[in-house]
Image (tube, rainbow, N blue to C red):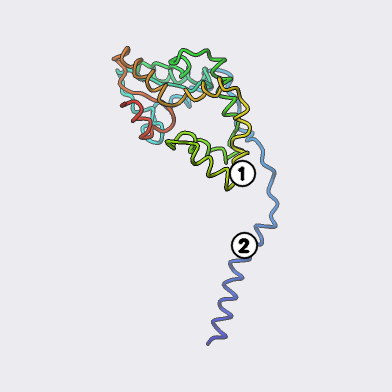
Amino acid sequence: MKATMTILVLLFSLVLVSPLGAAEKANYPAPRFPSYLKPPKSIDDIMPFARAAVRQTGGRTPLGLAEKGTAALIVTEVGADPMVMQAIKRAYEERGIKIYVVSEHELLGVNKEDALKAIRSSRWYTGEQGYMEVRHWLDDLFIDAEVPKKWLKERRPDLYNAIYAKGDDAPQKERELAKQFGGPTVAEAMIKYLDQHADIKAVFWRRGGRPRTARLLAA
């Protein structure tokens, strides 16, 4: 009986291992940019996607929740593509919705070039440096950021240097300006803007309408 069970276990193991071994030997093509994705040349190229976006009532940023006959505000990041935002605006207007599109730097009264320079000096990374996401957690979500930073530096100096070395090279003025975007300072400016535009019934800002965003505007 034991011998039979041993044989069955060995056979089962071979069944599991064989596909894995085959997968390891497979030759996959090198990663490359999808050929079917082409940069839009005009607003008309974007409109089909913009119309779909302003009708979406679910997901992380449901632009379709704005109702016909009302007004909505979209607060964009400094680097938002103007042509895309124009397409979104037109799509909303087709639905009978008045739309205000305002950038964060406009709300703060900051020159766009200065804003972009400040943001890029501290947010130079892309998705390729996935470990950089932890910087947001350390800098923004702790009451005293120096405590977790000290902890990380002592235990993983290599990771600490990878996260902070380059951003810390930026001038202090640019780093301070970059901190103004996407947080409480913009929220305060938005509240003032909303007080001046009482017709606005929906606000779209940041990514996903998370509770922290709502709390910033409710303050």
**Residue 19 got which mark?**
2
Answer left or right for 219 relative to 18: left
Measure how far apart labels 1 and 2 are at the Cα level. Answer: 40 Å
Q: Mark 1, residues whose alpha carbon is within 10 Å: few (<14), some, or many (≥20)? A: few
The residue lying at 57 percent from left, 41 percent from top is 131
**Residue 126 got which mark?**
none
Whole-percent x and y of residue 95?
36, 20
Whole-percent x and y of residue 35?
64, 33
Q: Which residue is mark 1?
A: 157
Whole-percent x and y of residue 178?
52, 23
Query: Which three-letter amino acid code belongs to the residue tagged 2?
Result: Pro
Q: Quadrant of residue 162?
A: top right
The residue closer to the viewer here, 119 or 179, is 179
Looking at marks 1 and 2 on the same chain, the residue that comes earlier in the sequence is marked by 2
Q: Mark 2, residues whose alpha carbon is within 10 Å: few (<14), some, or many (≥20)? A: few
Give the mark count: 2
